[in-house]
Image (tube, helix red, strand yellow):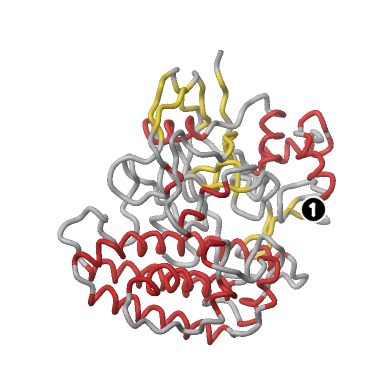
């Protein structure tokens, strides 16, 4: 995937399109060469995304929620070393025991870690030393795949697969984090001058959903995270989901009507956040001398084009806009059923779409055993679910049952919305 190309992959069928060039875990016979190719594919994409950045760019941490590019490159490597190689490659030599502390993220069971807010203070190892770390682990993973017998592969492939999807998540964070950093630079730093936001394709109208008891959650073959399970029944009330995403032009109408200055539109916590942060527009927007608005992008600062989807908005802003419009945000079950059973325009490859569903466990959910059980389950409080994927999501990563989640005040991701309407 070229750096200038948007990811517009729309998952096919219930479980989504085939991710990167890897077989399903259920495929027989197991093909270690195919898994090695998948591993190389994902690891190379991380390096391709980091390639336009100088060592200084890779060091910066512009806020507590973001991480340096260098840290993303090292942490995804640590993940394979910690959960795959330490346990499953006899004789594996740890690259540097001290780095375990530096590049663990939030896995308490795996040991102590550098505080998240202080990742930008890790000037050593430098970017080249991190590259050497990646090569060291890559050689070991390939050796593991080449030498493992069928029984060993049965144990290692589930860990390898979750590691690949984990790295793809960090590939998106790599771009959103550097965008936030560049947005703080008064010289207007640019990641890729040729980058363009893709045009939406949605036609007008809405997807109508009748009252039903629908099954939601992952089913069938293919990868899934544990928070997509178990599949369960969900009540769908009669509703309609807009085919089109809310645009910059529509958002400016909200702004002109005093949307950011009307407490009657806002949740209490949202009003406190908006006032405390001085929000008067989406993230990265700036009013220009001619009275228009510009937005910081991966291609630099550009006009806020009225027909492009609005992005970099918090849940609080999305909720306020829906209330202003006399509409609703969809539930995640409504979104999933509409996308799966009816086709939802621009569901993927533009912006993650806020739902009004709190990020909680599905009925009967149990986290994975061990440290990997900390991946999703322990975050099931005080966050909201987003569905779809964004322009920064790696190719093949998007799937219909996928549950993304962020805190309601956060807006440095490519987050937008589509409206819904519950019918009486």
Counting from the top left corner in percent of width and height, residue 260 is at: 80, 39
- The kind of secondary structure element at disc 1 is strand
Query: Where is the C terminus found, in terms of image quarters?
Result: top right
Furthest residue toward left: 29
Count of numbered badges drawn on the protein:
1
Q: Quadrant of residue 271?
A: top right
Against 169, is 113 above or below? Answer: below
Disc 1 crowd rating (10 Å Cα; few below 14, some 14-19, many 20+) is: some
Residue 372, compared with residue 218, is above or below; it is below
Query: Residue 106: which quarter of the image?
Result: bottom right
Question: Depth check: 398 or 104 in front?
Answer: 104
The x and y percentages for residue 258 are 82, 35
Q: Relative to 338, does residue 310 appear above or below in the rendering?
A: below
Q: Which of the two residues, 277 or 6, is positioned nearer the viewer here? A: 277
> Residue drawn at (58%, 74%), measured in percent from left and top?
101
User: Is 131 or 341 nearer to us in this picture?
Assistant: 131
Residue at 60 percent across and 41 percent down: it is 384
Which corner quadrant holds the N terminus? bottom left
Q: Position of residue 352 (x, y in %)?
A: 54, 47
Give the image location of residue 190, x and y in percent.
Answer: 64, 70
The residue that appears at 66% across and 31% down in the rendered structure is 322
**Residue 252 sits in which quadrant?**
top right
Determine which residue is flagged by label 1.
287
């Amino acid at each position: 995937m070229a750096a200038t190309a948007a990811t517009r992959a729309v998952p096919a069928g219930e479980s989504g399109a085939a991710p990167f060039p890897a077989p399903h875990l259920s495929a027989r016979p197991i093909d270690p060469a195919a898994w090695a190719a998948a591993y190389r594919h994902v690891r190379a994409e991380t390096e391709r995304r980091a390639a336009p950045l100088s060592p200084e760019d890779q060091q910066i941490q512009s806020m507590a929620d973001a991480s340096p590019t260098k840290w993303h490159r090292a942490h995804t490597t640590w993940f394979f070393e910690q959960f795959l190689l330490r346990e499953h490659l006899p004789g594996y030599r740890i690259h540097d025991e001290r780095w375990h502390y530096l590049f663990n993220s939030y896995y308490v069971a795996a040991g102590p870690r550098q505080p998240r807010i202080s990742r930008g203070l890790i000037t050593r190892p430098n970017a080249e030393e991190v590259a050497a770390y990646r090569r060291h682990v890559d050689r070991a993973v390939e050796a593991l795949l080449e030498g493992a017998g069928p029984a060993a592969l049965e144990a290692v492939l589930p860990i390898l697969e979750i590691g690949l999807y984990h790295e793809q998540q960090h590939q998106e964070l790599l771009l959103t984090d550097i965008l936030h950093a560049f947005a703080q630079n008064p010289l207007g730093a640019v990641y890729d001058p040729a980058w363009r936001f893709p045009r939406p394709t949605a036609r007008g109208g809405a997807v109508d959903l009748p009252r039903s008891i629908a099954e939601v959650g992952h089913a069938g073959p293919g990868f899934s995270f544990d928070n997509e399970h178990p599949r369960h029944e969900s009540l769908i009330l009669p509703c309609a989901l807009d085919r089109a995403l809310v645009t910059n032009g529509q958002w400016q109408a909200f702004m002109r009507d005093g949307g950011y200055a009307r407490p009657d539109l806002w949740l209490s916590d949202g009003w406190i956040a908006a006032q405390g942060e001085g929000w008067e527009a989406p993230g990265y927007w700036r009013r220009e001398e001619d009275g228009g608005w510009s937005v910081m992008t991966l291609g630099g600062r550009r006009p806020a084009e009225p027909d492009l989807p609005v992005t970099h908005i918090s849940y609080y802003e999305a909720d306020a806009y829906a209330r202003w419009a006399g509409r609703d945000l969809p539930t995640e079950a409504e979104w999933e059923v509409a996308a799966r059973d009816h086709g939802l325009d621009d569901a993927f490859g533009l912006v993650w779409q806020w739902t009004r569903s709190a990020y909680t466990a599905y009925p009967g959910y149990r986290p994975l055993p061990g440290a990997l059980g900390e991946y999703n389950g322990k975050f099931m409080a005080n966050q909201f679910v987003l569905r779809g994927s964004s322009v920064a999501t790696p190719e093949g990563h998007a799937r219909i049952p996928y549950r993304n989640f962020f805190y309601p005040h956060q807006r440095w991701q490519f987050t937008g919305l589509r409206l819904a309407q519950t019918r009486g």
